[in-house]
Amino acid sequence: MVHSDKLAALLRLQQLVLDSEDISALFTTLVPQILTEILSTGSDYEFLSVVFVDPSNQLRKSHFAEKEGNRIEPVNASNIFSFEGLFQEKTEWVNVLQGHIAVLPNASLIIKPNYDRLPILHSVTVCPIRFVKRVSGIMILGSSRSPEQVTIDELELLQLISYLIGMAFRLEDTQTSITSTTQQIYKMNAQLHQLDKLKDDFVSVASHELRTPLTAIRSYAWMALNRSDVIITEKMKRYLGRTLISTERLINLVNDMLNISRIESGHVEILPQQFDMRDLIKDIIIEVEAKAKERGILVSMIDTPLPKVFADPEKVRQIVMNLVGNALKFTPPSGAIAISFFTDGKTVDTAIKDSGVGISPDDLVRLFKKFGRLDNSYISSATSGGTGLGLYICKTLIDLLHGRIWARSEGVGKGSSFDFSLPIATPDVLANAEKYTIKLGGNAKVLEPVVV
Ligand code: ADP
C-alpha cells in the first residue's frame, strides 16, 4: 500500500472513532470496519483477526474475517486459533508481549492444523495491542507471502491501526464500566432511599407509639403530685417530681426526634411571607409569661423600628421558642431575658440575651451539633428536660430559611446571647421568592411545637 493510501485508510478509521455516537459499541463497529478496510486495500492477506483476552488470559472478544474473492467473510475465530500459549509467555511470543510486531514464518504456531488455508500461509504477522499497560490483545494477519516480502511500510500501518484498536477498546471498556458503575449507584441509591424511608417510618411510628403512654404517665404523675386527695410524704413528692421531669424529657426527645426526622428527610415546607419580627416576639413573650413568672425571670423586648423579614413565620416561631425556652432553662431565678434587634438593611438580627449560666468559649463551637448538650449546664441533664437537639433543629431550620445563627457568651456565669439573622423582604428578595420557598404538596409534615 502506498503512503497516501495508508494515510487515507488511517484517517477513515480515525473518523470512525470520532463519529461513533455509541462509544459502548465502538469496538464492535470499528474492528469489522478495520478488517474490511485492510482486506479491501488489495493486500494479499488470507485472513485478519483481532483478539482480546481478559487479565486471566481467557478470550474476551474476537473478530475474524477471511478474504473470499472480493468478499470479506466473518468466521468463528475459536475454531482456527490456538493462541493460549501466546499470553502465557511462551518464548516465541516474548517479543510480541513486549509490544513488538512479529512476522512469523510458521503459521502453525498459532493456527490450528485443521484450518483449511494453513498450507497456503507462508507468514503470520502478529501485532500487539496494548491496553492498560499490558498487551491484552493481538491483531493477526495471515498471508501467502513469505516474511521477507512483508514491507516495513505495511508493518508501520499495522502498528498504527493496532494503536487505534487499543484506543477504541479502552474507550468502549471505560464506557462499559461507567455504565455499570452508574447502574450500581442508581441501585444503591434506591436501596438507601428505601432504608431512609424505613428509618423515617420507624422513627415516626415508634415516636407516636411512645408519645401516647408517655403523655398518660405525665398526666398521672402530675395529678398524683398536685391533685391527689391523699397526703403524700416529701420523699414521695420527690419521686413523683423526678418522674414528671423524666417523662417530660422523654416527650421532648420524642418530639425533637420526630422533628429532626421530618426536616432531614425533606418533609418540611418552607412558605415564606413578609412579617414584622416584633409582632412574633411579642406573641411569644405573652405565651411564655406564666412560665417565666413561675421561675422569677423577667422577659422583655427592646422595641426599635424594623423592616419586615421574609421567612416562614411558623419555623421562626419554632426557633424562637427553642431559644427562649433554653434561656429560661439556663437562667437562675430573678434573672432576665432581653430580646433586641439589629439591622444592616439586608438582614434583621434578633438577639435573645439572658443573664444565665453562660457558656465557655470551648463549648460555643459545639452548641449547634446534634446532641450538643454541655456538661456544665446550670441544671444537670437529668433534671433539665433537655435533649441536646434543640439548637441543632434551630440551625437546620435557619439554614432552610437562608439565615444564620450563632451564640455569644463572655464565659461561664456571664450570661449568653443566642442570635439569628433573617433576610429582609427587599424588592430583590421578593422578586426571587421561589428561592426561599420549599413546597411539597402532599408530602409535607408539620413540626411538633416546642413546649416551654
Ligand atoms: P437542650 O435540649 O439540652 O437544651 P439544646 O440543643 O437546646 O439542647 O442546647 C444544647 C446545650 O447548649 C444545652 O444543654 C446547654 O448546655 C447549652 N445552652 C443552650 N442554651 C443555653 C443558654 N441560654 N445558656 C446556657 N447554655 C445554653
Image (cartoon, rainbow, N blue to C red):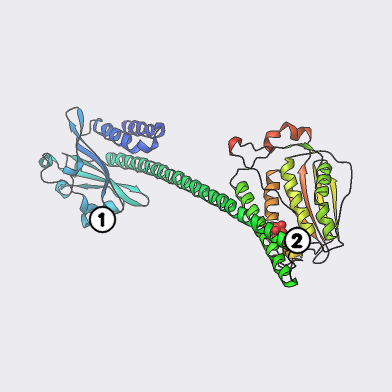
Q: Is mark 1 within 8 Å of ligand 1?
A: no
Tell me: 210 left or right of 315: left
The location of residue 281, given as percent across then percent down, is 82, 46
Q: Residues within 10 Å of mark 1 (few under 14, many from 20)?
A: some
The residue sitting at the front extreme is 229
Which residue, given by chain and number where applicable, does mark 2 sit on? 226
Q: In this rendering, is residue 70 above or below 176? A: above
Q: Nearer the viewer, residue 284 or 214?
A: 214
Label count reads 2
- x and y percentages locating residue 393 in the rendered image: 68, 51
Do the numbered discs 2 and 1 sit on residues whose CB atoms are within 8 Å? no
Name the N-terminal-most of marks 2 and 1.
1
Secondary structure at badge 1 equals: helix
Quadrant holding the C terminus = bottom right
Residue 282 tag number:
none
Report if residue 227 is visible in the image.
yes
Residue matched to label 1:
94
Q: Report the side of 284 relative to 215 (left or right).
A: right
Q: CA distance from mark 2 to mark 1?
A: 95 Å
